[in-house]
């Protein structure tokens, strides 16, 4: 009977499922209604109706219905699964536990419900509950996996507790005992179970026991990984400090496969443990010559390494890198561990070894990365000699190439040979730079060197012509080296002209090699330095960064896009990054569940730490904070700005001590001399600086939230809409106090980040602008006003100082940046050497005149203005309330005859509104100047023609419009909590949209060039055209920034205009 | 994943959603291998799985294989492939298969050198990096020692559409 009923239900439900699957939510809704008319208690149909409602955008209705269903405690598969799906979609997976808890309550032994309940706890890392449920499962359904789920849950508790002792004395021993009891019963079955046992023993540091297990029957179960057992034994022996065994084993492995670097490291690590503590000799092993003996004297190691090298030397070609690098690593470790290097003669001098390495491998791009660590082995005297020897080596090799009969070679063969030769030379260039040779050159010498590289670049291009573009071009490295030289000169002279030369070169380089990401990264960096964001968007797009790369590489543009005043784009970029973190959280948790289902226990703790690392990413916290803050100061409609503030501020404060730094700076390969290299210390410093910056942004945001939210509830009460306010309009003072403290703290001296390193934050600029102090004054003013009543008139009158500070500070800062973006005329650098080369091509004067910091300052100023104006608007109801109170009372007292004498704070309020308007007007004027400058820049374009007029700006605007639409769609999405299931599609579709535009920008520009070539081709070289295009790009980028700022200013001015008290 | 950018910034290397990598890690951890350089950079990685029905379709699959530009021409890819084949041998897979862009001549030649043959062509399998038309893929296979008669590389149909694949 039950099954018959079920199949009837199934048949009835099927059409609803089908409609939902096809995305016909409305039809699904009607189907569900239809079924419910026939069978009004069918919970599963109600669940599907909930999902349909939700997907139709009726979130509240859907959620209400879901609560009705839950109250009836459904226990059928369809309802429970459907509800789970719904909760996943609305990102309330914690509610899944609730429904299964109820189901389990009614059917305490049901395997299915218990399993689902277990998994629902996995999602929220409720380890204790997991343990309990798994044990219940095992009790009623004694299957191995359930027991091991419970054991794993115990291990997770051990790992997550802050109480180390509890973990060592309670959790882990318990887990150990449970497994051992199981082994005694002979019930241990799977490899995963053995691995979990070993994991626990490892955590307990019972390494001898691990070895015993591995050597017993259980060890034989380790089969899935290649040589799983052997390596498990080796790892255990390492942990058990059995260095003689470890050393001997790695020696054996190295003999088999000399190119595996792990073996090399294992061998050396164990040797240095043995060195000075020779192992007690085991008699048997001496007799048994088949087993390799450990090495514990320098002589032994030298002999072994030399043997490996000798053996490798016998190969004519395709030599492995391992033995040679092992030699270098040994030398490096000797240098670090033992100051005495006299004994290293047996291995040879570093210079010779490095030279031989270059002989064998410098034709491959990995060579430089391989040896860069070991270049430090060279003494100062060695360096020059080494570079000279490298050049001689190159000459010799080239000569021997030339001698071979070229006529017999095919073009590809010649090309490959030439590429190798070029690569060898590039190696020398990189080594010379790395060892600081470029630092010694004068400006003229640098330029001469750079020109030499450019010549090689041009000449070498043809040899890679037969390769697909996606492979990259070997001579690209010359282009990059020249850019580094130009950056050197820029660093010395602080003259932006050199950045423009970088732009010219990189843009040119990318026309030849459109997939070179290093050039793209440097170009983004350079445009940002120049204060122009428009070109970065398309370059960033072409990198096709996705998913996890938002976390590791998002730092490339996320801050700059807003700092440079491209707010629409910024909002879009931040939104995409935010949805990545949401998706990541969701997807990675599902993988945890997969791990439990598949029994890959040893991956669970890895996954847990991965989740922590990305979840606590500083970038994630920054994105969340900045996005809401930016909405607040860029949203024209004040009500909407406040809505977004109210809805999107994270309820939890940022836990700064747990934040992680996931930025990947290794994407640009660092060939720089030691002073200009990006070291870990600097990255750490920038991490600290970023945290400080984030702290400021968070305090700002939370202060606004508490103050403006209070004001808003006041406002809506007046309008008769009583809102559901829990804060009673009460103003929380904590954040402002913290902010005050922040202001008083001294800034550490600014770290000198290298050019390719982290962006400095705006912290310093903010302090120059007295931004934090201004905001404190603003908040104090608002707090004062919001507590306004007749009783504290005196205090209120003292407030006027506060708002005057706000007004004065903004005005003062605006003064520093309101004079347009074009500096006085500037002379281009006139090089004496080789006129007409790429490095001396004249740069249009108007490009050189563009001042780099202006936009950033204007943006900051606009931000301060926008936030202050917004606060003033929000404070109006308080002032009005006091005023009307006064008038009413005075009217009562004195009748209508005397006009009301208003307290001075009301007049001050009115005055500050007028003051703000004045700043707004000045701002508008500054924007006009900016736009005038844009016109000057654009007019100086040689290549522009009628249909190209305003193209950059227009394209930029269409891009914005498009983004604006997707952006607002995104926002509403966010408000509706609709992101969940379609996030991936959402992302890809928006980012596609995002990408399609910049691409078209490029295309159009290229087309413009083509048609122009005929007209102006004679006048302009390749680089000249790039510079000319740069004029248009610069104009477009500045125009975009100024227009977007103007829009916000206008909106604020409009709000201020209506403000009368 | 946090460090693989120098590999994945390559235009032909797809960066998948986090869940994709993690699912492989959760289900087939032994099929995920990373080659690190002495300086600790990721030189390349391979990611695969074992799947299919017994008796004649149980096989290893190469999902992704990529080597950073600076570490090419060192036979790293071949080394990683060898290991993946060994893992598959251990699992008694009958063959190992993979998909490759028709235009990716370098990879194609390498796979052929390693003993893979073109089993069939799958139409429009890859999306283009430049937004042009989709690209065909070769479905390549290499039998393991468990496929004694090498039957797994014989096919009825040499060209299929991507829909037929599933």
Image: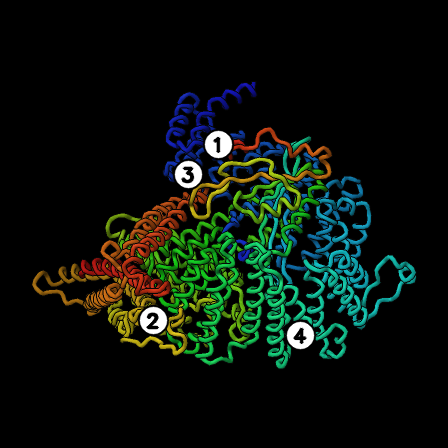
As helix, strand or loop, the secondary structure at mark 3 comes to helix
Residues at discs 4 and 2 both on one chain: yes
Which residue is at 50% across, 37% downward? Answer: A84
Q: Which residue is denoted by mark 2 in the rendering? A: A842
x, y percentage for residue B88? 69, 42
Label 2 CA crowd tier, 10 Å (few <14, some 14–19, many 20+): some
Q: Which residue is denoted by mark 1 in the rendering? A: A72
Residue A379, numbered circle: none
Q: Chain of mark 2?
A: A
As helix, strand or loop, the secondary structure at mark 2 comes to loop
Nearest the camera: A793 or B5? Answer: B5
x, y percentage for residue A871? 28, 61
Residue A937 occupies quadrant: bottom left
Q: Is residue A90 above or below residue B7?
A: above
Q: Chain of mark 4?
A: A
Q: Nearer the viewer, mark 4 or mark 3?
A: 4
Nearest the camera: A208 or A559? Answer: A559
Which residue is at 35% across, 63% downward? Answer: A1026
């Amino acid at each position: 009977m039950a099954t018959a009923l079920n199949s009837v239900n199934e048949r009835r439900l099927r059409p609803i499922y089908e409609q939902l699957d096809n995305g016909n939510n409305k039809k699904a809704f009607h189907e569900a209604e239809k079924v419910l008319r026939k069978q009004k208690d069918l919970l599963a149909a109600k669940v599907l109706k909930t999902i349909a409602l939700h997907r139709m955008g009726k979130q509240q209705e859907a959620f209400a219905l879901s609560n009705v269903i839950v109250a009836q405690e459904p226990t059928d598969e369809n309802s429970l699964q459907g509800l789970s799906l719904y909760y996943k979609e609305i990102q309330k997976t914690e509610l899944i536990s609730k429904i299964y808890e109820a189901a389990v309550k009614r059917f305490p032994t049901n395997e299915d419900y218990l399993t689902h309940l277990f998994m629902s706890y996995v999602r929220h890392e409720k380890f204790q509950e997991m343990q309990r449920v798994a044990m219940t499962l095992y009790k009623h359904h004694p299957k191995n996996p359930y027991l091991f789920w419970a054991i794993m849950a115990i291990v997770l508790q051990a790992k997550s507790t802050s109480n180390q002792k509890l973990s060592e004395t309670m959790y882990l021993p318990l887990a150990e005992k449970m497994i051992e009891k199981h082994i005694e019963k002979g019930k241990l079955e799977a490899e995963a179970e053995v691995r979990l046992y070993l994991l626990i023993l490892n955590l307990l540091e019972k390494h001898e026991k691990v070895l015993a297990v591995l050597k017993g029957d259980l060890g034989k179960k380790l089969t899935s990984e290649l040589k799983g057992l052997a390596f498990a034994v080796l790892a255990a022996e390492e942990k058990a400090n059995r260095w003689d065994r470890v050393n001997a084993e790695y020696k054996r492995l190295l003999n088999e496969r000399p190119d595996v670097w792990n073996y090399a490291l294992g061998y050396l690590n164990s040797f240095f443990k043995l060195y000075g503590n020779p192992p007690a000799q085991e008699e048997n092993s001496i007799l048994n010559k088949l087993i390799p003996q450990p090495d514990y004297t320098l002589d032994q190691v030298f002999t072994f390494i030399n043997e490996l090298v000798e053996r490798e030397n016998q190969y004519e070609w395709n030599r492995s890198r391992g033995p040679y690098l092992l030699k270098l690593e040994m030398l490096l470790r000797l240098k670090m561990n033992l100051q005495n290097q006299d004994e290293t003669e047996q291995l040879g001098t570093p210079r010779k070894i490095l030279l031989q390495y270059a002989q064998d491998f410098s034709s491959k791009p990995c060579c430089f990365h391989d040896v860069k660590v070991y270049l430090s082995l060279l003494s100062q005297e060695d360096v020059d000699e080494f570079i000279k020897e490298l050049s001689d080596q190159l000459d010799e090799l080239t000569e021997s190439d030339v001698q071979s009969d070229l006529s017999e070679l095919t073009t590809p063969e010649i090309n490959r040979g030439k590429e190798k030769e070029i690569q060898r030379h590039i190696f020398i260039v990189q080594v010379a730079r790395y060892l600081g040779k470029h630092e010694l050159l004068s400006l003229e010498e640098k330029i001469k060197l750079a020109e030499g590289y450019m010549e090689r670049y041009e000449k070498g291009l043809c040899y890679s012509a037969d390769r697909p573009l996606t492979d990259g071009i070997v001579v690209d490295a010359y282009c990059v080296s020249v850019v580094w030289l130009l950056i050197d000169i820029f660093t010395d002279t602080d003259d932006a002209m050199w950045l423009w030369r970088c732009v010219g070169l990189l843009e040119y380089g990318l026309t030849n090699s459109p997939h070179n990401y290093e050039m793209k990264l440097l170009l983004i960096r350079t445009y940002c330095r120049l204060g122009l964001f428009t070109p970065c968007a398309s370059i960033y797009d072409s990198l096709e960064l996705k998913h996890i790369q938002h976390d590791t590489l998002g730092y490339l543009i996320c801050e700059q896009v807003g700092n440079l005043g491209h707010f629409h784009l910024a909002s879009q970029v931040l939104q995409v990054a935010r949805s990545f973190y949401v998706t990541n959280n969701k997807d990675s948790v599902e993988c945890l569940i997969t791990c439990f289902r598949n029994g890959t226990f040893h991956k669970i703790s890895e996954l847990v730490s991965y989740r922590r690392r990305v979840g606590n990413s500083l970038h994630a916290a920054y994105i969340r904070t900045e996005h809401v803050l930016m909405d607040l100061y860029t949203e024209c409609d004040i009500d909407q700005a406040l809505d977004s503030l109210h809805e999107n501020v994270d309820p939890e404060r940022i836990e700064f001590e747990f934040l992680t730094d996931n930025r990947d700076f290794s994407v640009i390969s660092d060939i720089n001399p030691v002073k200009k290299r990006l070291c870990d210390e600097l990255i750490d410093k920038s991490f600290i600086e970023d945290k400080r910056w984030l702290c400021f942004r968070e305090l700002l945001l939370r202060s606004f939230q508490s103050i403006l939210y209070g004001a808003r509830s006041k406002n809506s009460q007046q309008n008769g809409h009583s809102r559901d306010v829990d804060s009673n309009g009460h103003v929380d003072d904590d954040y402002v106090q913290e902010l005050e403290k922040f202001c008083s703290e001294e800034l550490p001296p600014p770290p000198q980040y290298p050019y390719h390193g982290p962006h400095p934050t705006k912290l310093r600029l903010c302090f120059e602008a007295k931004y934090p102090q201004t905001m404190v004054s603003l908040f104090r003013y608002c707090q004062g006003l919001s507590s306004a009543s007749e009783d504290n008139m005196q205090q209120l009158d003292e407030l006027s100082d506060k708002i005057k500070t706000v007004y004065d500070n903004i005005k003062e800062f605006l003064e520093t940046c309101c004079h347009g973006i074009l500096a006085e005329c500037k002379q281009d650098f006139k090089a004496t050497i080789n006129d007409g080369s790429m490095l001396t091509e004249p740069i249009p004067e108007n490009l050189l005149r563009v001042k780099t910091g202006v936009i950033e300052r204007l943006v900051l100023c606009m931000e301060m203005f926008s936030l202050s104006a917004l606060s003033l608007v929000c404070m109006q109801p308080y002032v009005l309330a006091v005023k009307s109170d006064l008038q009413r009372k005075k009217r009562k007292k004195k009748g209508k005859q005397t006009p009301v004498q208003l307290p001075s704070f009301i007049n001050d309020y009115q005055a500050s509104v007028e003051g703000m308007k004045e700043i707004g007007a000045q701002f508008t004027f500054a924007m006009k100047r900016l736009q005038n400058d844009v016109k000057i820049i654009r007019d100086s374009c040689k290549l522009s023609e009628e249909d190209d007029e305003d193209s950059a700006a227009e394209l930029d605007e269409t891009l914005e419009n498009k983004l604006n639409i997707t952006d607002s769609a995104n926002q509403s999405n966010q408000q509706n909590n609709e992101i969940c299931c379609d996030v991936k599609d959402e992302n890809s579709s928006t980012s596609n949209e995002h990408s399609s535009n910049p691409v078209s920008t490029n295309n159009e520009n290229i087309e413009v060039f083509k048609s122009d070539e005929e007209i102006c081709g004679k006048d302009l070289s390749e680089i000249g055209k790039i510079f000319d295009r740069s004029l248009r790009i610069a104009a477009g980028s500045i125009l975009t920034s100024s227009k977007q700022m103007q829009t916000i200013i206008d909106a604020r001015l409009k709000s201020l205009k209506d403000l009368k008290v | 994943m946090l460090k693989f950018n120098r590999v994945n910034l390559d235009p032909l290397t797809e960066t998948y959603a986090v869940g994709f990598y993690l699912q492989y890690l959760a289900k087939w951890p032994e099929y995920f291998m990373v080659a690190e350089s002495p300086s600790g950079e990721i030189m390349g990685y391979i990611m695969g799985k074992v799947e299919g029905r017994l008796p004649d379709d149980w096989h290893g699959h190469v999902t992704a294989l990529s080597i950073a530009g600076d570490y090419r021409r060192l036979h790293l890819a071949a080394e990683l492939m060898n290991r993946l084949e060994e893992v598959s041998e251990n699992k008694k897979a009958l063959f190992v298969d993979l998909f490759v862009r028709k235009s990716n001549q370098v990879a194609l030649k390498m796979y052929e050198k390693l003993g893979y043959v073109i089993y069939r062509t799958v139409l429009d399998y890859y999306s283009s990096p430049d937004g042009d038309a989709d690209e065909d893929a070769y479905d390549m296979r290499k039998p393991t020692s468990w496929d004694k008669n090498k039957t797994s590389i014989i096919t009825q149909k040499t060209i299929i559409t991507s829909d037929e694949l599933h």
